[in-house]
Image (cartoon, rainbow, N blue to C red):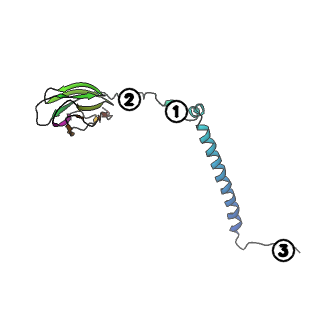
Amino acid sequence: MRRVDRDPNPLADVVQRSTEWMFRLAALGLCMLAAVQGLLMVPQVRVWLLPVERLEGAPVQGAASAGEAEISLSLVGGGEWPDAYVTINGRPVQAFSHAEVRLTVHEGDALQVDATRARGNRRVSIDHDSPRLLTPVAGLEWDVGGGRKSPVVHVHFIAINP
């Protein structure tokens, strides 16, 4: 007579089989992941598979334009500093022939005070009353030394729904 060895635990066989299936599924998942990642390396396939790629660079319909804002740069303590001037995106815009300079700025502009030809140190303050202007922050002050340029301040707006 033939003797059949039975495992005393009836769930051991189920666990053994499910472990084998989980390993196979994990291996299949890794192979599929590698295949999809490989396909995404091809630009033509990437555009076809990802709708985001088709929309990239397209303007959002109904979005409000960033607009513009008026800011003022003031010399703390008053006076004038005629050899120092304000640049927007690297282009000279206006000299400090008075204690205050008023400018119109747009999204992405880079503001800087160029004092490379000026003498002495001065403190410059930025002020504005636009609720949409995120940076520069109203009240921002920095010291500008003669013979140097100030740090660049980038202009950014926030979207406020009317």
Question: Is residue 119 part of the magenta span, yes or no?
Answer: yes
**Residue pointed to by mark 3:** 3
Front-most of residues 84 and 63: 84
Instruction: Report the side of 151 relative to 15 (left or right).
Output: left
Instruction: Report the side of 16 relative to 67 (left or right).
Output: right
Q: Can residue 69 be seen in this view?
A: no
Q: Which of marks 2 and 1 is in front?
A: 1
Q: Residues within 10 Å of mark 1 (few under 14, many from 20)?
A: few
**Residue pointed to by mark 1:** 53
Q: Is residue 118 above or below residue 17?
A: above
Question: Is residue 78 part of the magenta span, yes or no?
Answer: no
Instruction: Report the side of 61 relative to 66 (left or right).
Output: right
**Residue pointed to by mark 2:** 63
CA gap, disc 1 and disc 3: 65 Å
The magenta segment:
117-127
Circle nearer the N terminus (3, 2): 3
**Of the residues shown, which amino acid type is indicated by label 2?**
Ala
Front-most of residues 62 and 123: 123
**Of the residues shown, which amino acid type is indicated by label 3?**
Arg
Circle nearer the N terminus (2, 1): 1
Residue 61, horizontal then vertical, whole percent: 42, 27
Front-most of residues 142 and 58: 142
Residue 5, horizontal then vertical, whole percent: 79, 73
CA gap, disc 2 and disc 1: 20 Å
User: Mark 1: which secondary structure?
Assistant: helix
Q: Residues within 10 Å of mark 2 (few under 14, many from 20)?
A: few
User: Mark 2: which secondary structure?
Assistant: loop
Q: Is residue 159 above or below residue 10?
A: above
Which of the 4 quarters of the picture holds residue 151?
top left
